[in-house]
Amino acid sequence: IMADQGAAMCEQLIKAVNVMMDAETSQIYRLEALKFCEEFKETSAFCVPCGLQLADKAQPAVVRHFGLQILEHVIKFRWNNMQQQEKVQLKECAMQLLSKGTHSILEEESHIKDALSRITVEMIKREWPQHWPDMLKEMEALTSQGEAQTELVMLILLRLAEDVITFQTLPTQRRRDIQHTLTQNMESIFSFMMAILHVNVEDYRKLVSVARAHCRVAVATLNTLAGYIDWVSLVYITSGNCHLLEMLCLLLSEPDLQLEAAECLLIAISRKGKLEDRKPFMLLFDDVAIHYILSGAQSADGLVVERRYIFLKRLCQVLCALGGQLCSLVGSDVEVEVPANLSKYMEAILAFTTHSSQFLKSSTLATWGSLFRHETLSKEAVVVEMAIKYLRASMINLVKTGFPSRDDNPSCGYSRVDFDSDEDFNLFFNSFRAQQGEVVRIACRIVPLEAFQIAAEWLQYQIASPIDTGDTTSKSAEGLCSLLSPSVVQWDAMTVFMECMIAQIFKNLEEEKLPIDQSMELLQAVLNYETKDPLILSCVLTNVSALFPFVTRRQHFLPQILYKLFKAITFEVGQDNKAPRTRAVKNVRRHACSSIIKICRDYPQFILPCFDMFYNHVKKLFSSDASLTHMEKCSLMEALVLISNQFKDFAKQKAFLDELMASVVAEWTSEEIRHVLSDPAVFLSFVGADQVVTEHSKDTDATGLNRGRLSFCLYAMLGVVKRARWPADLEEAKAGGFVAGYTPAGAPIYRNPCTAHFLVLLPNLLLLIRTHNSLYMPENMARLSETFAKAHEVMDAEKNVVLGLSQHLLDIYDSPVYRTNLERMQGFFTTLYDNCFHVLGSAGQSLQQEFYTISGLAEEINRSAFFSLDHVPDHRLRPMIHILFCHLLQLVLSCPQEYYDSLLCPLLGPLFAYMQQRLNVKWQVINQRTSDSQVTQEMLEEQLVRLLTREVLDLLSVSCISKKVPEPAANKEEIEGQTRTHQVTLSCSLNVAFELKRFFFFPQNIYMTLLTLSFTSLSWKDTTNCHRTASMVCWTLLRQVVGGNLLPEAVTWFYTSVLRALQVHGQHEVCNSTLSQLAMLIYENLRPRYMELRAVMTQIPNISVEALDQYDHRLMDPNAQKVGDKKRKDQFKKLIAGTVGKALCQQFRKEVHIRNLPSLFKKPKPDKDVLNTEALGLAALFSPENNAL
């Protein structure tokens, strides 16, 4: 009857499997079939017989696979409850399946082989070596039965290594037992695998008829070797004069085996370890090995064949790993000569650097960097010679070509394999170019003059070449280039090279060797070069800036340079100034402004003689050229202020600033503007946000001009406040009248020539900030017209940045910067708000003492910046905190202690209290959201809260916490001999690395706010913030008050906050580690005085009270035996393990329980006969000569 039932059940299962796998089946039937199969696996008594029957090789592959799945399920979930006889029987049947249960090696499906190997490995994990001592011998015996069995054995050995070593999916003791036994037998396992590889490679080469079968076994063996090479002792890899590596090198020339051989070689050569043990790797620089590696690399570069291309990538990685070993060994304590074949080796790397694939080129960069940086190798003649070749190669590599959508370069074909889209490629190339720049700079240190020659020739070539717009001309004007035009990509690459080279020349050549005359010729050629193409002109300007350091040696060039830059500031493509400018044109003008500011910032003393000429030119521009934007005007003002710092005469500089700022001060302090800034309704009307405007109607010119007036005043204020400075040298400052007096400590009190202007402008600035905050109130939001209803929402570009979406559009430079009226208004509000805080923050840095002493400043900032914060959205609050307090951080650092109470505490205290309450509410809403909806708005809101949280906690940590420099201990014994005192101090990052800033002292109420904020934030759903705050902030703050009289409720709350965070973030290894450490610090420091902490511990699910008592005893009893740090940490982690939350993917997973076997390392105690007899019975379980069967 049982047999009949089993057969009937098998028929039903086969039907169910076919229903599931049939594409035509409806969803309902498929689910029913699935449910039937799952219930069978969980509950049926016929699992083993049915599994075996379904796994029979006469069945179709899907049915066999399901039969094997049933058997695997039995072993994973029922093994511990099976009788000894059942286990023996199942094991024998599994061995039979390995021996006779498969088709030939080339016919059998790979998923069947995989399932068979899994069953065997699951049994090995439960019974080897204690109860199945001859497992390896049985595996070896199987290999004599043919190729199919040999391949299965390789799969079993590979899967065993992966489960035990790589993924570590076993309980600790079982893992140790198996790893120990594998290591003990490694010599025989390795020689066994090597022998199989050797035999099958030989047969594959000789016996054409069965070559495919032997090839399949060789591939499986190489894959298995790869799973072992990673972790076995280096001795096995390098034994027999690196026999294994030699064999792998030979296989690089076998097309069917080369990829797997390269994988093995890569893993082997990437091994770390003692330098002495790695010395044999240098044999790979010998003629034979290098020959095989080179011949593997030299293949047709043109036809993109995927497997071949993957092999080239691996081979390239092999060469790079070999370079890593070379750089580690040469010049170290281990005596290693520079290999004779170094030149050949570098030629091989250069072959990859000049390959058509951009990915292969990029893979070699780190190796070149290491070689050119290496103290010994970089002095070798062959390396110096190679540095020049590398620089020549980089002339091609810096050129941005190879877009997957195009066909204008051999690299496009490879890019189609490596990148999904042009945007992907663009992102990759930008990072690739940055890395290239770094390597070019290192190479230029070795050969500075040769690098200069290359750059000079290249620049002259570009200047002489006619412009080639290619097939992708600009959309906005006839005959102009686009970003992908041949001329643009060439100019662009040359410019990058020039910038990298110039910086190094000045660092690495003595003054008399500098090629000044030649560089002046170059500069003259660049200055004479005229182009109407904005993209190329941008590159020309960069070259002017790059060559500028040489001009300091030839001053007569200066007027020409300034003329070139001034001309670019007013650059237009055509005569018609009415059309909207393209982004490329705007960029040229902005570029020219930046170049002028940069020159004035870096060489103000040098520009000073031209000040009058410069100033007159600016005045002329301002009066005549109506097309200058506010930013351009303010950039020029900024440059003038930078030069004026060199007057080193307070009165003269102040008089100049008075003249420069006269119109701005008059405008900003006028009655009209004050009226506008003090009333939200008037303000909205003034800027036109309450008017309905159609896209075609001129956005009522008056309101556009009004917005411009406000923007210009703020930009001008910012430029002056940011740049006006007193001389750095105290004597010069005294002589120039910049020192107003001295502090009681004797430090000079400086005065800034722009203070008077700032103080006049400040009241209306604060008014604007207050009014801006009140714009978000419901009544003012209602005043926005239909056109501008979304004026305060996040701008699209900002949205993409927040959500991490890329914006690398390639035709962005072509389209005119045409924005809708709404976008213009959004941009205006955003920039205006940000600039208000930039001005306020810069003033703190520039004015310092004069800033702290402004009477009632804290109250004024509170009344304006912190006014109506409840209505200010997160995306506006975040930049406010970021900008204001990035600047205020400098203020905090330079603020004398006497102004703490009057300025810092009144600002930071209320802000932290408010943010703690606001963020807590926001995070509660987020934590309670159940819908995992991908609604962009919800994602955006959540991400903004996350970013705002990080901003606030960054502010908290920078204002209170600094990194501690550890004091060097006298000697090693001293460190080891330090005994643990009652107040535990763990040598962990939480305790040693951070401390409160020396000057830090907040009143108690603010201090408690900081503590509450940092501990509450641990359980908000943001792992980055949790890790950072737990490791840097929480203990650093709490440690200061541990010795005081904290209330028991407070101590309990701090501790439970950490445990709550473990519940939210515990599944993430990094957070788990820092939070466990923090919990342990709190427990060990406070448990002796607060019994309440024990009460919290007893509420942890599944805690062992006995283990807790033991831990407490060691902690409280001075005479108790102490244990080491690591052991204590592990014990504490076990105690609190019940609080750790599970990841969603783990929550519904069925647990697999693998029992420990009698220990291999300790003799079992002979106290219970039952155990002993059972152990003997089980030991016989899997021995091959078990006659009970």
Image: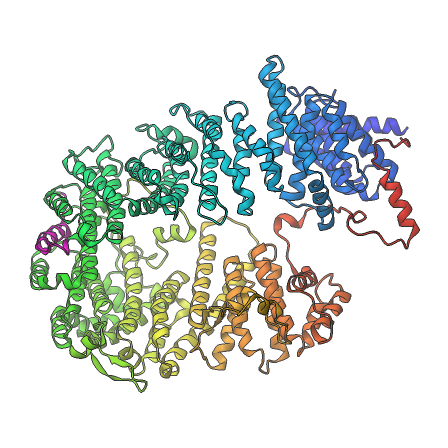
On the image, the x and y values in percent for residue 783 come to 31, 64
Quarter the N terminus occupies? top right
Query: Is residue 1048 rendered to the left or right of residue 282?
Result: right
Name the residue located 55 percent from the left edge and 25 percent from the top edge.
Answer: 257
- Judge whether residue 571 is colored magenta: yes
**Quarter holding residue 666:** bottom left
| Front in this rendered view, residue 367 or 787 | 367
Q: Position of residue 884 (x, y in %)?
A: 34, 68
* Colour style of the rendered protein structure: rainbow
Query: In x, y percent, where is residue 882?
Result: 37, 64
Residues shaded magenta: 551-573
Q: Residue furthest right?
A: 1169
Query: In the rendered view, does 615 fall on the left or right side of 1110?
Result: left
Residue at the bottom extreme, as displayed = 744
Q: What residue lies at 68% left-to-right and 75% top-to-bottom?
A: 1092
Answer left or right for 96 relative to 263.
right
Q: Position of residue 118 (x, y in %)?
A: 70, 35
Magenta span: chief secondary structure? helix
Visible in this render: residue 1005? Answer: yes
Give the answer, above or below, for where 1027 lies relative to 402.
below
**Figure quadrant of residue 1179:** top right
